[in-house]
Amino acid sequence: MLLPLPLLASAAVCVSVCVSAAAAAASSGGGHGASGLLSHPPASVHSSSSVGKPKPWSLRRSVDAFEASLSKTRLREALRTYTSQPHVAGTKGDEDAAEFTRATWEAAGLPNVHIKPYYPLLNYPISRSLTLLEPARFEASLTEPAIGEDGTSHDENAVPTFLGYSPSGNVTAELVYANFGDPTDFEALASRGIDVKGKIVLVRYGGAFRGLKVRAAELAGAAAVLIYSDPKEDGFVRGPVYPDGPWRPPHAVQRGSIQYPNFYSGDPLTPFVAATEDALRIPIEQANIPKIPALPISYADAKPLLAALEGKGVQASTIDPKWQGGLDLQYWTGPAGKAHLHIDNDFKVKPIWNVLTIIEGAKEPDRSIVFGGHRDAWVYGTVDPCSGASVLLETGVALGRMYQKGWRPDRTIVLASWDGEEYGLLGSTEWVEDHVEILNMTAVAYMNLDSGVSGNRFSASASPSLANLIRDVTKGVRDPESGKSVYKEWARRSSNGKSTTKPPPVSPLGFGSDFVSFLQHVGVAATDMSFGGNYGVYHSNYDSFHWMEKHGDPKWEYHKTMAKIAGRLVLSLAHLEVLPFEFSSYADELALYTRDVTKALDAANQPQAWGTPLVKAVDAFTKAAHKLDKETRAASASSDNNDDTLSSILGDDPVAAFEKRDADADADADADVGSVLVMQGSDDGDAMMSGVVHAEDATITKGKKHKKPSVREINDKLAFAERKFLDPNGIPGRPWYRHVVYAPGEWTGYAAEMFPAIHEAIRKQDADGTLKAIDVVAYQIQLAADHLAL
């Protein structure tokens, strides 16, 4: 535990969001600033009076208008603009991208567009070197050579290879190879007499999040860490390398953050509170970042280091065949050789820039849908994140056009272009921590889009209550290659190419993108989705516009398809009279996770009866969920307007229904492409909005029970049920994570662990901790069951 619990507890108490203060706040000054979540614009900035009296729009009409406005040309040019220069968080290129986003949304006619800065800890490379001293001298290049046909790759030092939050250091030591660098890998080395203390440990990407590799090495006593991309994972073993194919070339390097995300996300110096300019900060020694230096390297630079270990220590494949990587040599553990690592990184608190727009709901302005994704990148970031950022930008352009024609959502829509995600989900986490109370009262759902397009294979992760909404929405969108619906193609791929009636999987949300603070800190149901493909240039200089044109989405069809899916999700959540949540699926998942606890107890030689409180709570939740879902379906079926139902955007043959409009839409949508694609500087006269829209009825209805609950009562049960899974004390040892069902695994990072407190206690063989965790989880599930009950 890096942070003392009393310090974290005191920080939690200091959450600096005050609804009444936000409502009364007034801006003072120009530049980027803005405050408040749901904000009224000044009369001079896109007020409703400037576009006529709002008219009610059905879901079907809204979707039709949205999709008619989408443009592949605009998506392509937005991606070109975002990736025209490096835009690491906190740099001039990053600020330019923020201003481009703001200017584009304002030009489209969106209201309340503003830039909200925060001030997190960041680091940047000054110098670094890696030299193999023994048995033969080798100087690692640590650069990514230019590729002739890729124009942006010609600046080899556009962003030097480095790791976010690595400390500086000078280390001369022997080398040890430790496979993926998981705790079990270090245990395997120790059991064979391989001591890593004081050594430079070489690990490969794959498995756990890179920061946890460094943490495991640090806890094992290593002096420094080198992380390389093995061709077995994403290089020539997988297929042709870039530029001939999509896979990682020999000198490509995966940059990234090595923050320890299992403790908290966001700014390392301000856990629980927003990183405002004058925020109280903890000492850097107590932050969730490494104490030993680390550097990413290519497999071209790793090969001589691995060759220096041959015949020394233990042959890696004898530990486990999976320890052998894809290079043409035998992998050995060492220790052997001697290397010198030099890293000089500059740490500083710097501004980052979130860009937001708030479209006030016409019927329920105090209920909000947030759709966000990050914009910052380690270099150019064509796939990660700019494929998603361009879709988010285009969503705003389409909604802005609709707004100018009189469209208003029934519920408030917030679009958010986050900054600083790559360092540790900085922009989204700080914004959430800045608006905890308001989000508790108003947020219905959060939709995330990160690496939106790298191929044609759709996948999704979500809170179980939103899984079927994603499935339903994809039934009405055509897959560009197969001509079938995205849903059918998704289901076919999920069943290894076989025709199936089984619904495609929607995975649980763990770590790795901006949904984390929404779901796991404040309990807002969330989604994440992408079109994946063969993508080997992740976080390298070659994640470029040229790579996307040649390998990712040459015709920009999947960018537009993703925009359709995103738009339908947003508009469904904003327009449907009865929210499209479904909790029977959640109950099924909880039952599955409960069976996993029973198996874990049995494997640990603990009584299965310990899980009884959990079984009872899940049973109560299941009964309440089925009853509420039945009531929800009845309320949805009674809608007076068939164009305001989810089925209105599906139809009997959704593919045929939308095919002709797709062909016509681009010509119309491209007509004024130039008007929103100019990179603009800051407008010192940009208005700053503040205040909270209509939060007077933000708590869940607690009045008399009705035989037939109102739609508002049903919706509040649906929207706020996820909050009931939050334990105010958080997961033992890492209290920032408060969701008792889902959290990043303690040693996985990216992957979710279900009932994390229970499984962590079982692994530690902590009987008292296991019983307490089961009681806490059962209590929260029972609260959720009581909340759902009619």
Image (spheres, helix red, strand yellow):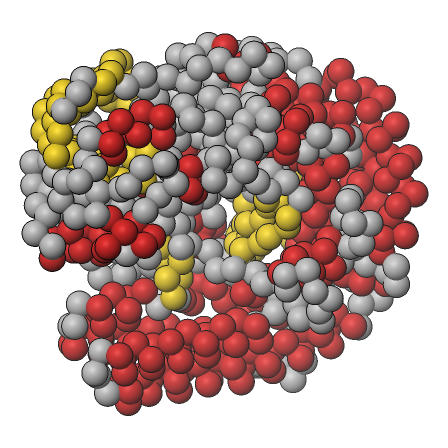
Q: Residue at image x 26%, y 79%?
A: 603
Task: Describe residue 658's horizontal placement relative to residue 333 as left or right.
Answer: right
| 272 over 152 or under it: above or below | below
Residue at the far bottom: name it.
609
Q: Residue at image x 23%, y 55%?
A: 319
User: Residue 569: x, y in percent?
Assistant: 67, 51
Disc tally is: 0
Q: Nearer the viewer, residue 21 or 152?
A: 152
Q: Nearer the viewer, residue 746 or 468?
A: 746
| 325 over 620 or under it: above or below | above
User: Residue 631: x, y in percent?
Assistant: 67, 78
Task: Describe residue 464's horizontal placement relative to residue 278 as left or right.
Answer: right
| 777 over 669 or under it: above or below | below
Q: Residue at image x 31%, y 25%?
A: 301
Q: Toward which corner of the image does residue 387 lie, by quadrant?
A: top right
Task: Describe residue 587's horizontal placement relative to residue 762 as left or right.
Answer: right
| 370 over 201 or under it: above or below | below
Q: Nearer the viewer, residue 646 or 166?
A: 166
Is residue 374 something that shows in the picture? no
User: Residue 53: x, y in percent?
Assistant: 81, 38
Is residue 347 something that shows in the picture? yes
User: Residue 488: x, y in percent?
Assistant: 74, 59
Query: Which quarter of the image is occupied by the C terminus?
Result: bottom right
Q: Residue at image x 73%, y 42%?
A: 561
